[in-house]
Image (cartoon, helix red, strand yellow):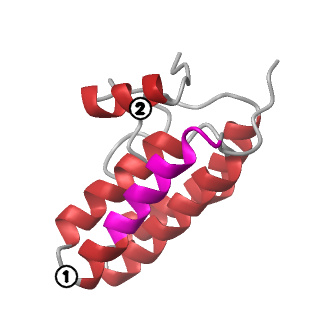
């Protein structure tokens, strides 16, 4: 069994770009666009415990911002268990991480993110 620990340097810039885009859109009040960048950051970082947990922390904060009990309650277990699942390599690949989707369901990865994984030399399966 492979244990995943930290985000590879080859993937880090792409993850950080998504978080920066999230912050920018959030600051401008473009909440839908901000959320989309959090989902993309989740997909890029979900295999690695710290980045995975960090995105769920940001999603929990977002839930408070939009006053969504569903998102708040949905993020708490994801925040508690997501990093552990990452550490042991048991993640639902492509899952965007929000409370609007089943937490263990894999999703197809959009082409742009697939290309990022290829450029970063990261296998997604």
Cα–Cα gap, marks 1 and 2: 26 Å
In the picture provided, is 46 more to the left or to the right than 1?
A: left
Q: Nearer the viewer, residue 13 or 67?
A: 13
Residue 92 among those drawn in magenta:
no
Q: Are marks 1 and 2 in contact (CB under 8 Å)?
A: no
Asked which secondary structure carries label 1, the reply is loop
Q: Position of residue 15 (x, y in %)?
A: 48, 51
Q: Secondary structure at mark 2?
A: loop
Mark 1 packing: few (<14 Cα in 10 Å), some, or many (20+)?
A: few
Task: Classify residue 96 by image quadrant.
Answer: top left
From this view, report whether residue 15 is shown above or below residue 44: below
Q: Please name whichever residue, 84 or 13, is drawn nearer the observer in this view of the structure.
A: 13
Regarding residue 23, the answer to whether it shows in the image is yes
Mark 1 highlights which residue?
Answer: 29
* Image quarter of residue 17: bottom left
The reply to whether the magenta stretch includes residue 20 is yes
Q: Label 2: how many residues lie within 10 Å, few (<14), some (14-19) or many (20+)?
A: many
Helix, strand or loop for the magenta stretch, by majority: helix
Q: Is residue 96 above or below residue 94?
A: below
Residue denoted by label 2: 94
Indicate the position of residue 59 as horizontal and vertical percent values.
44, 65
Q: Residue at x 32, y 23 (%)?
A: 108
- Badge 1 or badge 2: first in the primary sequence: 1
**What residue sits 19% from the left and 82% below the top?**
29
Magenta range = 9-22
- Residue at the image position 27 percent from the left and 55 percent from the top: 36
Relative height, residue 67 to residue 42 (above, below): below
């Amino acid at each position: 069994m492979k244990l995943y620990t930290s985000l590879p340097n080859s993937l880090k810039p792409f993850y950080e770009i998504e978080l920066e885009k999230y912050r920018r859109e959030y600051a401008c009040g473009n909440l839908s666009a901000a959320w989309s960048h959090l989902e993309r950051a989740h997909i890029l970082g979900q295999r690695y415990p710290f980045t995975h947990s960090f995105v769920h922390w940001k999603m929990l904060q977002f839930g408070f911002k939009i006053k969504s009990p569903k998102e708040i309650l949905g993020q708490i277990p994801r925040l508690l268990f997501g990093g552990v699942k990452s550490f042991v390599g048991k993640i639902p690949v492509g899952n965007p991480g929000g409370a609007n989707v089943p937490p263990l369901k894999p999703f197809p990865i959009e082409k742009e993110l697939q290309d990022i994984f290829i450029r970063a030399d990261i296998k997604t399966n």
